[in-house]
Image: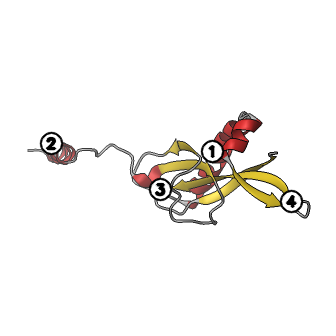
Amino acid sequence: MTQFASVLLLGIMIISSSNNIFDEPQGCNCHCRIGFKKNDPVKEYPNPVIDIGIVESWGGIIGATNSRSAICKSRCYHAALEKLQHMPKAEFCSKSERFLSGQNRVPMNRLFTYYKVGGRNWMTCDSRFEKCE
């Protein structure tokens, strides 16, 4: 058996023994959510107001690098901006958390955009304010 045939056979054996060898690892996905202010950074961000989902994916085995985190932040920002800018004020106000802001105690609502790459922490990159009376 030639060396090429041996390598090919080994590759076929590895592929057949692994169910999802071509699936992207978790570290290669950029996740995006819109919700209430937690902290920055946070390890978990369950129950968002809007789960935008995965906005970018990278193939291969290299996970969450700093450059991918920067790309993820940009992609999430634009995806969230698209959702938040086109959301009617009434819908935004019904989804967002009320808090009292300023000396005049005007009801204000605020939603934040969170992003993460793979197993990294969730980071915030944008917010929207509305005066909801």
* Residue contact at pointers 4 and 3, CB within 8 angstroms: no
Residue at disc 1, secondary structure: helix
- Name the amino acid type tagged 1: Arg
Find disc 2 in the rendering and name its residue.
Answer: 5
Q: What residue is at 19 percent from the left and 44 percent from the top?
A: 4
Which image quarter is the C terminus in? top right
Find disc 3 in the rendering and name its residue.
Answer: 118
Find disc 4 in the rendering and name its residue.
Answer: 105
Against 126, is 41 above or below? below
Which of label 4 and label 1 is nearer to you? Answer: 4
Which of label 4 and label 3 is nearer to you? Answer: 4
Q: Give the percent coordinates (x, y) of residue 99.
A: 75, 58
* Residue contact at pointers 3 and 2, CB within 8 angstroms: no
Disc 4 from disc 2: Cα separation: 75 Å
- Name the amino acid type tagged 3: Gly
Disc 3 from disc 1: Cα separation: 15 Å
Q: Give the percent coordinates (x, y) of residue 18.
A: 21, 47
| Mark 4 nearby-residue class (10 Å; few <14, some 14–19, many ≥20) | few
Image quadrant assignment for residue 87: top right
Disc 4 from disc 1: Cα separation: 35 Å
